[in-house]
């Protein structure tokens, strides 16, 4: 990919670019916990977004998006949100300047193989790669965490998704062969080896693009905040669902609407599940870890209502296929992929079976990605 991009850049702009690769992510467990100040357990994967960039001695950013065969140019001043993929670049450019940094014009090519709308955070990979490239070229001095916040702020203010920090964090901090246990309150994190040579992390794409995700995602976040506001009246020390136990939640069930109660119940139980899951992972116990994943799917589907028929089918069907330790929908939901932990020698059979039965029912063959856990954003 790097050589191809270099050639393409040379042909289009007649210059040598800096090339940054930033990965998409998987999340083993801890879903919809990041914006509730809980823990998450993501890892960066071998599907990446690439940004090739060089200065152009102007005040304009010129972008060519290979995947869409589209070009887009914008001046560095007066940036406003628009509709479309360029919003991610506009947002990052805006927020870097908003932090008092001076940019000059650049020529850019973007490309990548993170499936869009598949819940593998192609957008975080793009904002991370683009921000990382600007940081390098102009010596802006941002840390990886700063770049993650710039990407997150872009989602909030230019895209309108009030996401947590997990995706941007994972794309920028990933480490080959490791998942990251991130405390989304303190932002402290620890690398945990994902050391299971006999197993693969296999993603199955429901082929439903998560277009509803934006608005419904924000609604979930508001419902969690509504629960917190009610509980806070009794316990002023509660600042997020991170501070709530199932016991406290149960005591005040009658004060919460049934929907808000269900949403909070899911998040609080997911928080506990993540801790048990991490322990199991560290002991090398994929059986228990898989049970946690399955329970997460049930919670996301029933109490949190972010699944869909296709994802429910994939998670349930996986449970009947030999060699599968656990399966659940992954990411924001309403489409995208399931994540499955599958014994290596069973992957081929798993792929055939899940594709066949999904195709029978939904008349489309789901894409299957056998992923490796890789390093975060870097120059290549
Ligand atoms: C999306 C968001 F971007 C993340 O911040 C996270 O909340 C995730 O959904 C759900 O765990 O990927």
Image: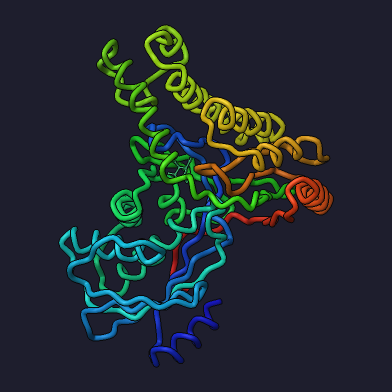
Relative side of 149 to 182, left or right: left
301 or 249, which lies in front? 301
Which residue ends up furthest to the left in the rendered image? 100
Identify the residue at horizontal 22%, vertical 65% (top origin).
79
- In front: 266, or 287? 266
Residue located at (49% from left, 77% from top)? 69
Task: Answer above or below: position of 108 versus 263.
Answer: below
Q: Going by the image, does 178 lie left or right of 80?
A: right
Residue that appears at 80% across and 48% down: 360
Looking at the image, residue 373 sits to the left or right of residue 380; the answer is right
**How many circles with numbers are drawn on the protein?**
0
Which residue is depicted at the point 40% across and 63% down? 84
Image location (x, y in percent) of residue 146: 29, 54
**Where does the image place residue 370, in percent across and percent down from the top left?**
69, 55
Q: Is residue 53 visible?
A: no
Tell me residue 279's x, y (percent). 58, 30
Q: Is residue 128 left or right of residue 354?
A: left
Q: Quadrant of residue 124?
A: bottom left
Q: Can you tell which quarter of the image residue 36 is in?
A: top left
Q: Is residue 226 above or below residue 342?
A: above
Return the x and y of residue 209 as percentages of the image width and height.
56, 52
Q: Nearer the viewer, residue 52 or 280?
A: 52
> Quick check: can you spot residue 314?
yes
Quadrant of the rendering where the N terminus is positioned: bottom right
């Amino acid at each position: 990919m790097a050589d191809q991009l270099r050639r393409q850049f040379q042909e289009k702009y007649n210059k040598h670019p800096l090339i940054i690769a930033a990965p998409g992510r998987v999340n083993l467990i801890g879903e919809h916990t990041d914006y509730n100040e809980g823990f998450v357990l993501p890892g960066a994967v071998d599907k990446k977004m690439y940004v090739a960039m060089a200065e152009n001695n102007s005040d304009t950013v010129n972008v060519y998006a290979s995947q869409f065969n589209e070009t887009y140019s914008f001046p560095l001043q007066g940036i406003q949100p628009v509709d479309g993929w360029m919003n991610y670049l506009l947002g990052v450019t805006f927020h870097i300047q908003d932090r008092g940094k001076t940019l000059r014009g650049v020529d850019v090519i973007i490309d990548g193989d993170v499936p869009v709308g598949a819940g593998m955070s192609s957008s975080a990979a793009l904002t991370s790669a683009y921000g990382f490239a600007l940081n390098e070229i102009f010596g802006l001095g941002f840390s990886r965490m700063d770049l993650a916040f710039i990407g997150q702020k872009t989602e909030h203010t230019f895209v309108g998704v009030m996401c947590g920090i997990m995706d941007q964090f994972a794309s920028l901090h990933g480490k080959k062969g490791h998942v990251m246990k991130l405390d989304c309150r303190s932002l402290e994190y620890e690398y945990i080896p994902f050391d299971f040579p006999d197993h693969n992390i296999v993603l199955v794409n429901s082929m439903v693009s998560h277009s509803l995700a934006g608005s419904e995602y924000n609604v979930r976040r508001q419902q969690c905040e509504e629960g917190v506001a009610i509980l806070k009246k009794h316990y002023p020390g509660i600042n997020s669902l991170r501070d709530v136990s199932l016991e406290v939640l149960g005591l005040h069930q009658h004060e919460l609407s049934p929907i808000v109660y269900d949403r909070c119940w899911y998040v609080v139980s997911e928080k506990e599940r993540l801790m048990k899951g991490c322990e199991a992972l560290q002991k090398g116990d994929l059986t228990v870890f898989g049970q946690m994943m399955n329970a997460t799917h049930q919670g996301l589907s029933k109490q949190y209502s972010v699944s869909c028929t296709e994802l429910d089918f994939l998670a349930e069907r996986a449970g009947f296929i030999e060699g599968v330790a656990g399966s659940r929908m992954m990411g924001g939901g309403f489409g995208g992929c399931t994540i499955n932990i599958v014994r290596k020698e069973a992957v081929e059979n798993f792929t055939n079976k899940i594709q066949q039965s999904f195709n029978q029912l939904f008349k489309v063959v789901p894409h299957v990605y056998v992923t490796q856990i890789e390093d975060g954003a870097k120059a290549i």
